Amino acid sequence: MSDAIRSRALHERTRLRLAMKSWQGDEYGSCNQCGEMIAPGRLEFDPAASLCIACATGNESR
């Protein structure tokens, strides 16, 4: 189980680093797939979210 915890921690660290990088590049809050803004509530729940809810759920028709 220790390997699973370590793997999850590394994954989260990577997600947070990518979010910080996008923030520094003024791209924070934009969906990596469609380019639309990610809802503030989604970012509040998960500050490292990289996809809007439509792209994350596969419901990309707008």
Image (tube, helix red, strand yellow):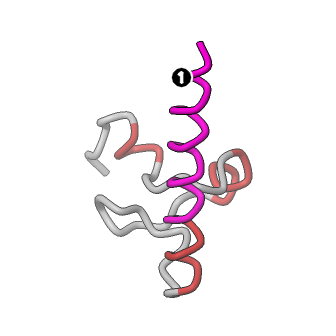
Residue located 47% across and 44% down the image: 53
Badge 1 crowding class, 10 Å Cα cut-off, few under 14, some 14 to 19, many 20 or more, is few
Q: Is residue 51 magenta?
A: no
Magenta range is 1-18
Q: Is residue 48 or residue 2 the one in the foreground?
A: 2
For this orientation, the residue located farthest to the left is 61
**At 49% across and 67% down in the image, what residue appears?**
37
Quadrant of the rendering where the N terminus is positioned: top right
6 or 33: nearer the viewer? 6
Q: Of helix, strand and loop, which mostly describes the magenta segment? A: helix
Q: Residue furthest top?
A: 1
Q: Which residue sits at x=41%, y=62%?
A: 31
Q: Nearer the viewer, residue 27 or 11?
A: 11
Residue designated by label 1 = 3
Which residue does the image show at 61% across and 25% down from the upper left?
5
Query: Is the residue 39 above or below the residue 57 in the image?
Result: below
Residue 35 lies in what quarter of the image? Answer: bottom left
**Count of numbered circles in the view:** 1
Where is residue 49? Give x, y as percent.
Answer: 54, 52
Q: Is residue 18 left or right of residue 9?
A: left
Q: Is residue 56 above or below residue 41?
A: above
Q: Which amino acid type is shown beneath numbered disc 1?
A: Asp
In the foreground, 56 or 4: 4
Residue 33, position in %: x, y?
Answer: 29, 58
Q: Does the magenta portion include 4?
A: yes
